[in-house]
Image (cartoon, rainbow, N blue to C red):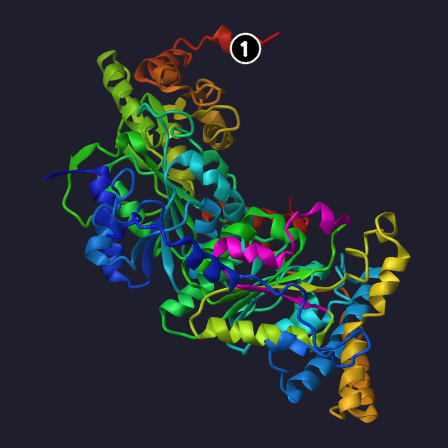
């Protein structure tokens, strides 16, 4: 039977809680309401309102309180309602959650999961569509994973809850209602492994979250035009799978990175740097990025102009120096 | 399902709220010369046991000597920086003695004295300030969180940890230190609110030492007292003369027992004074008068307790001499142990970022090792 990504996440929470008494779920509206995206639907009713409970509306408090519980034998899984509402918890994440193990020379681990529904494409008004992954990825001590498929949503969340370290699970809102036929429980590749979603010999496309279906759509069209894209779902930004990426680019010699977040100093910039460091001698063209613009996330009626789409990915593919001639656009143009 | 349809009558709210308020004036037992005041404890708090007071005295003498030694070591370049708590001995030691060993303490960077009073090895206690790591003691073994440098951010941790213990049926209490400046932070609000809503057994001890580095209390708050902040969260509170060890212990022990018995968090404001500058790097003459410091030195917590205990016969001159001798030996040993540079292990930089280093961290560790071997 086909289930949605939201249902897979719900089952992952239930299964983790059934397996381990120390797993507790809390946040804003996660109790009787089941979360604004219904990811915790029915959990308080079925597993007890002491295992899944509402908290005061205060994200720093939620994450700081969870850290205290994690220091004392619990495995809290907290929900932040929307990407941009995580910012009040920023100091807790950066100054404490990410550093506690290091600060205590390994004595105090923080088995804590922070679930953050993120990204656009759902018509959200301001503060409901941010792609904030770069902030977390840039913070040493945090693991950051992003499912793009229904089985990965289940498996990555289970692995995050079992992990001895803090994990930020970024859930692409746009894919919450995507469906797949999958029997749960399911285990997919572990942290640190990218997955080839579509093999190809001509170009490696690196994507994660809601950008994966965009890349796959572009690959379908490109194939009709005679170019085979290898679509890699990065899945876990930290730890990052350099090996699979380098093997793919070593084979194709061309690479495009796709994500929704602003391009400047985004995760794509890191991936481009890592690709050229490892694959310079295999590359036939500059590694290009297809990302959101460097603008605050647009209002809902304008978001389609901002979000990467298959056409933009295909346009980038076209610029990969197929005739071995440099694309003048990328050589000398410096904005005045 | 709960309903919010019925509002409680105003007079019920009023009488319940009044019980949350602190006394109009700080709780006191001793005057500035260490004599028992007529309305000791405002008639609401019991005199602590004599053995607790004599133990407090010994640890305060030790703490003050330790603090002076740490300041001296900083001037000699042996510590990177040192925030002294001289003048705050009653709070530092009172906070420790109100707890059992199994209770948790949440210190800030100014609580080095409380750390050693808890029995933590002084070299381990000074690791953060010596600079060879961020925390030198094992928080689980000592039931003491790493010293918190960002202000107030440890208060939600204390609430979460204490709530976790209570869920398991343990009677553990957490005591969190915070300063007057820290009460302005958002996490002070969130920590108290979470502790109250979840009835977490936490005692919040505000050491109001009158300055947040250079900013005086009057610029920090318009509240009648910092203890008055508790009522907004439904947290009962008290204010106490923070240089009166008897009063500090009386109030803290009551607050800790109350929390231990399942009645939730408590807020204590201790009025005290930071005799030294913020740290060795600070110049306090730019923002306060020497006369003000001198006035507070006349309320010295160690001298007050010593006078009181000598007068009651709980201490003898020999006891006082022995406490000072012990403190001297302790300081001398600390000096010797900190004379040499600490040994550092660069591998540790990479080892504790995660439980298992990522391939990237292993690679970076290798680069540094090659560089150190001169192979790069």
Estimate the x, y position of residue B289 in percent, counting from the top left.
88, 54
Task: Report the label total.
Answer: 1
Estimate the x, y position of residue B44 in percent, counting from the top left.
59, 76
Question: Is B42 left or right of A169, judged from the image as shown?
Answer: right
Rendered view: B239 above or below A168:
below
Question: Is B73 left or right of B207, judged from the image as shown?
Answer: right
Residue at 55% x, 47% y: name it: B186
Rendered view: B206 above or below A242:
below
Report if residue B298 is visible in the image: yes
Question: Is B136 left or right of A89, judged from the image as shown?
Answer: right
Residue at 22% x, 43% y: name it: A8
Say what secondary structure mark 1 lies in. Answer: loop
Q: Which image quadrant is residue A319 in? A: top left
User: Between A295 and B305, which is closer to the camera in this rendering?
Assistant: B305
Residue at 18% x, 34% y: name it: A179
Residue at 82% x, 77% y: name it: B33
Crowd around label 1: few <14 · some 14–19 · many ≥20 (10 Å): few
Q: Which stretch did the figure color magenta?
A: B214-242
User: Between A263 and A82, which is closer to the camera in this rendering?
Assistant: A82
Rendered view: B217 above or below A121:
below
Rendered view: B254 above or below B180:
below
Q: Chain of mark 1?
A: A
Whether residue B238 is in magenta: the answer is: yes
Question: Is B362 left or right of A50, judged from the image as shown?
Answer: right
User: Between A69 and B122, which is closer to the camera in this rendering?
Assistant: A69
Identify the residue under disc 1: A331
Whether residue A103 is in magenta: the answer is: no
């Amino acid at each position: 039977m086909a289930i949605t990504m939201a249902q897979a996440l719900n089952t992952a929470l239930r299964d983790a809680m059934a397996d381990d008494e120390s797993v507790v779920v809390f946040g804003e509206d996660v109790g009787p309401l089941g979360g604004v995206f219904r990811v915790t639907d029915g959990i308080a009713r079925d597993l007890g309102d002491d295992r899944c409970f509402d908290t005061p509306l205060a994200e720093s408090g939620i994450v700081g309180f969870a850290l205290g519980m994690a220091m004392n034998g619990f495995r809290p899984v907290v929900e932040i309602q929307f990407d941009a509402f995580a910012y009040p918890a920023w100091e807790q994440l950066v100054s404490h959650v990410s550093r506690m193990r290091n600060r205590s020379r390994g004595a105090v681990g923080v088995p804590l999961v922070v679930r953050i529904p993120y990204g656009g494409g759902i018509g959200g008004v301001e503060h409901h569509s941010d792609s904030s992954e770069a902030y977390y990825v840039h913070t040493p001590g945090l693991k950051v994973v992003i499912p793009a498929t229904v089985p990965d949503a289940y498996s990555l969340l289970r692995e995050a809850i079992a992990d001895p370290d803090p994990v930020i699970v970024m859930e692409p809102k746009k894919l919450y209602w995507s469906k797949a036929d999958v029997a749960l429980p399911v285990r997919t590749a572990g942290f640190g492994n990218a997955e080839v979603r579509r093999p190809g010999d001509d170009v490696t496309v690196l994507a994660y979250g809601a950008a994966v279906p965009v890349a796959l759509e572009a690959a379908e069209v490109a194939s009709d035009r005679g170019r085979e894209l290898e679509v890699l779902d990065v899945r876990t930004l930290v730890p990052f799978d350099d090996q699979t990426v380098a093997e793919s680019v070593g084979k194709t010699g061309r690479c495009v990175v796709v994500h929704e977040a602003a391009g400047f100093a985004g995760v794509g910039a890191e991936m481009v740097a890592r690709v050229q460091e490892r694959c310079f001698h295999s590359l036939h063209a500059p590694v290009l990025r297809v990302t959101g613009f460097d603008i605050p996330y647009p209002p809902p009626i304008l978001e389609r102009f901002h979000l990467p789409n298959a056409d933009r990915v295909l346009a980038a593919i076209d610029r990969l120096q197929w005739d071995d001639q440099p694309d003048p656009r990328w050589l000398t143009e410096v904005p005045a | 399902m709960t309903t919010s349809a019925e509002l409680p009558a105003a007079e019920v709210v009023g009488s319940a709220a009044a019980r949350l308020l602190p006394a109009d004036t700080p709780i006191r037992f001793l005057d500035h010369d260490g004599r028992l005041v007529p309305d000791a404890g405002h008639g609401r708090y019991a005199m602590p046991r004599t053995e607790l007071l004599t133990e407090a005295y010994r640890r305060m003498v030790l703490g003050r000597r330790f603090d002076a030694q740490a300041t001296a070591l900083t001037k000699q370049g042996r510590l990177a920086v040192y925030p002294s708590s001289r003048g705050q001995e009653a709070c530092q030691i009172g906070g420790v003695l109100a707890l059992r060993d199994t209770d948790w303490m949440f210190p800030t960077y100014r609580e080095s004295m409380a750390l050693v009073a808890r029995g933590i090895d002084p070299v381990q206690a000074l690791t953060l300030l010596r600079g060879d790591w961020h925390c030198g003691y094992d928080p689980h073994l000592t039931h003491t969180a790493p010293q918190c440098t960002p202000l107030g951010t440890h208060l939600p941790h204390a609430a979460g940890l204490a709530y976790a213990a209570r869920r398991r049926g343990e009677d553990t209490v957490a005591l969190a230190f915070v300063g007057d400046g820290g009460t302005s932070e958002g996490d002070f609000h969130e920590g108290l609110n979470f502790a109250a809503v979840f009835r977490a057994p936490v005692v919040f001890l505000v050491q109001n030492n009158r300055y947040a580095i250079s900013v005086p209390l009057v610029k920090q708050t318009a509240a009648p007292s910092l203890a008055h902040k508790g009522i907004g969260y439904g947290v009962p509170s008290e204010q106490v003369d923070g240089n009166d060890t008897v009063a500090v212990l009386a109030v803290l022990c009551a607050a800790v027992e109350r929390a231990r018995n399942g009645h939730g968090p408590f807020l204590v404001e201790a009025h005290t004074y930071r005799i030294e500058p913020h740290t060795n790097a600070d110049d306090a003459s730019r923002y306060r008068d020497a006369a003000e410091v001198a006035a507070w030195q006349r309320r010295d917590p160690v001298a007050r307790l010593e006078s009181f205990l000598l007068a009651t016969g709980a201490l003898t001159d020999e006891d006082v001499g022995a406490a000072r001798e012990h403190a001297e030996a302790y300081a001398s040993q600390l000096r010797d142990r900190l004379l040499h540079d600490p040994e550092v292990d660069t591998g540790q930089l990479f080892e504790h970022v995660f439980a298992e280093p990522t391939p990237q961290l292993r690679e970076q560790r290798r680069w540094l090792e090659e560089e150190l071997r001169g192979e790069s």
